[in-house]
Image (cartoon, rainbow, N blue to C red):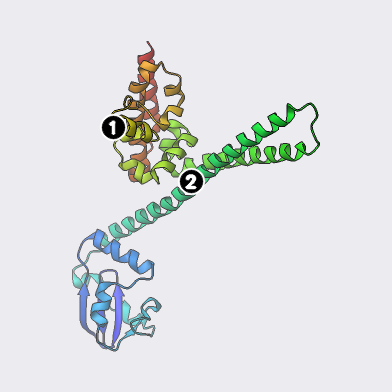
Amino acid sequence: MFLITKWFGVFLHDGEGIVEYRLFPKDEKEIAKRLLIIEEGGILDEEKELSRGKDVDVVEERLSKIGKYTPRYELSLKIIASDFGFDTDILRKAQIIVVEEKVKRELGREDLQVIQMVKSVEELTKILNILSERINEWKNLPVQDESIRYLNELKRKVDATIDELKERLGEKMKMLAPNLSELVGPLLAAKLISVTGGIENLAKLPSSSIQILGAEKALFRYKQGKGTPPKHGIIFRHPAVRSAKAKDRGKISRVLASKISLAAKADSFTGNFMADKLKRDFEEFVRSIKK
């Protein structure tokens, strides 16, 4: 008995004809789910069910855990989708979903790279500041030992590494999150992704949460009855927020957060490029505030 899996179902074939089968739901999402499992080398529930308690040969090496691998591709060719009421249009739609899911997963892996790069830049910047302080303190001595040159060389290397990482981070961000990078700049975009754990996580946040990302301590103090609620967090790094008058920063931060939310959703879910309009609208709002 041969166990044969097609895109629309799983079949038991005795060499002469089909003796038993399990069809998949006529739904592109359900079929896509099964196609992904197959591509990842997994075993479908329908395959386990049909093979349970039976001595079967399998025509795919993927299924060698539940049967003897015996390629019989000619048997598979005889099982046709239309004979079971399946239209190839369902397959086409399912394949599109599979591709979208693969892209989404790939972006997820890129998210992790971005997060590590952001953390590396931040940690190296701290090291650079410590080195600068040490060198300046050393230079204030009436006489400097020549050993100071080792610190100077190290400082130059750390500085160069930071520049290289930032350049690479900018390139990666333009591919991973083109809307967000264009709206707020690749470095701030990368920081937003880093603190939320990924572009999709950022896209799912309400704009009110995006506005105060990075200001969690201030928010906690406010909830404890100390101080005032924070008006902004990380997005204070944006020039429009940083250069604004104190009384306007809350309004500008709120609008910027809403644009960031839309940009992140476009990058994560639709793939549409809308940064030009988002940036233009935001800049017009900032100009109107300053009048």
Q: Which residue is mark 2?
A: 114
Q: Is residue 30 above or below residue 187?
A: below
Q: Which residue is mark 1?
A: 223
Residue drawn 23% across the image and 64% down it: 87
Q: Nearer the viewer, mark 1 or mark 2?
A: 1
Residue drawn 41% across the image and 36% down it: 180
Q: Secondary structure at mark 2?
A: helix
Is residue 274 visible to the viewer in this orientation of the structure?
no
250 left or right of 17? right
From the image, which quarter does the C terminus lie in?
A: top left
Q: Earlier in the sequence, mark 1 or mark 2?
A: 2
139 left or right of 198? right
For label 1, count other residues whose C-alpha is less than 10 Å away and answer few (under 14), some (14-19) or many (20+).
Answer: few
Q: What is the residue that sits farthest to the top in this orientation?
A: 291
Tag shown at residue 249:
none
Q: Position of residue 156 (x, y in %)?
A: 69, 37
Residue drawn 29% across the image and 59% down it: 94
For label 2, count other residues whose C-alpha is less than 10 Å away and answer few (under 14), some (14-19) or many (20+).
Answer: many
Where, by quadrant of the figure, is residue 254 drawn? top left
Residue drawn 34% across the image and 64% down it: 36
Where, by quadrant of the figure, is residue 276 drawn? top left
